[in-house]
Image (cartoon, grey):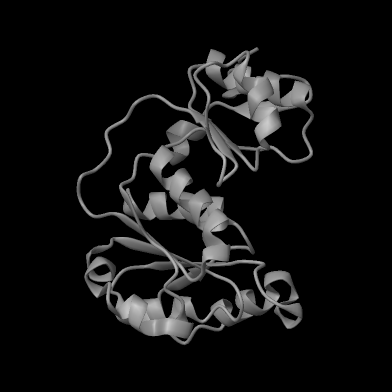
Amino acid sequence: MVSKLGFCDLGFAKLDLDRQIRRGFSEVVYCPGKSRGYLKKIAQGFIRNKQDLLLTRLEKNTFLYLKKSIPQLNYNPLAKLAYAVKKRKTSKKSGVLVICAGTSDIPVAEEAVATSEVMGNRVMKLYDVGVAGVHRLLHNLEFIKKAKVIIVVAGMEGALASLVSGLSSCPVIAVPTSCGYGANFAGLSALLTMLNSCSPGVAVVNIDNGFGAGYFASLINR
């Protein structure tokens, strides 16, 4: 039931129905660790209360299970993200630019892209332009200069975020990924590089957190 406090109490979960008013988008559901039954009741609760629905880190077989009772649910298999949102206008102006260092980083980048798009942003993608071949990035300077906020997704040593920040005039959100060999420590080396960026204007989210970057970029762009 809906309480006067602005949430729906399901017993095992309390759906924050005021989140959209406070942040501009409904509460987002992180799926790992939740049973199919819980996810179904949570999703139906948001739909019943006329909220946008965004499910992150959702496996395809669970999506197919949920789709049976929520036919309007869509799925991005690369980002592992499902959504059912009210139609909204997408800005025609330059907005979020997602830059990805290598092809192995694309799933995390796609999570950032899908999150930003679902939240109503115009998103442009620039993939496989890492520092090992910096000419690939420099060939696309026009897109970097037009962006209002840039998300940089990179594994290995994570140097791309500093380079992009030094070439741009807008905020940069750095996303370290777990792609890399042993001393990458599952993304820790990229995280530390990004945290120690010498270029001002770089904010860093957690390892592989494409969703967090996409959400933050949407707040900035809005």
Farthest-out residue, bottom: 198
**In the foreground, 128 or 172:** 128
> Looking at the picture, how far across and down is residue 204, in whole percent?
54, 68
The answer, for residue 92, to whether it is visible in the render is yes
**In the foreground, 51 or 128:** 128
> Looking at the picture, how far across and down is residue 113, in whole percent?
44, 50
> Looking at the picture, how far across and down is residue 153, in whole percent?
51, 66
Task: Relative to 152, say whether 218 is above or below.
Answer: above
**Residue 172, picture quadrant:** bottom left
x 55%, y 46%: residue: 79
Count of numbered marks: 0
Where is the N terminus found, in terms of image quarters?
top right
**In the foreground, 221 or 116:** 116
x 38%, y 77%: residue: 164
Please give left or right for residue 203 compared with residue 95 in the image.
Answer: right
x 46%, y 44%: residue: 114
**In the foreground, 212 or 71:** 71
The answer, for residue 27, to whether it is visible in the render is no
**Residue 86, picture quadrant:** top left
> Looking at the picture, how far across and down is residue 222, in whole percent?
32, 48
Task: Relative to 123, say whether 127 is above or below.
Answer: below
Please give left or right for residue 108 compared with residue 130 in the image.
Answer: right
Please give left or right for residue 172 compared with residue 210 in the image.
Answer: left
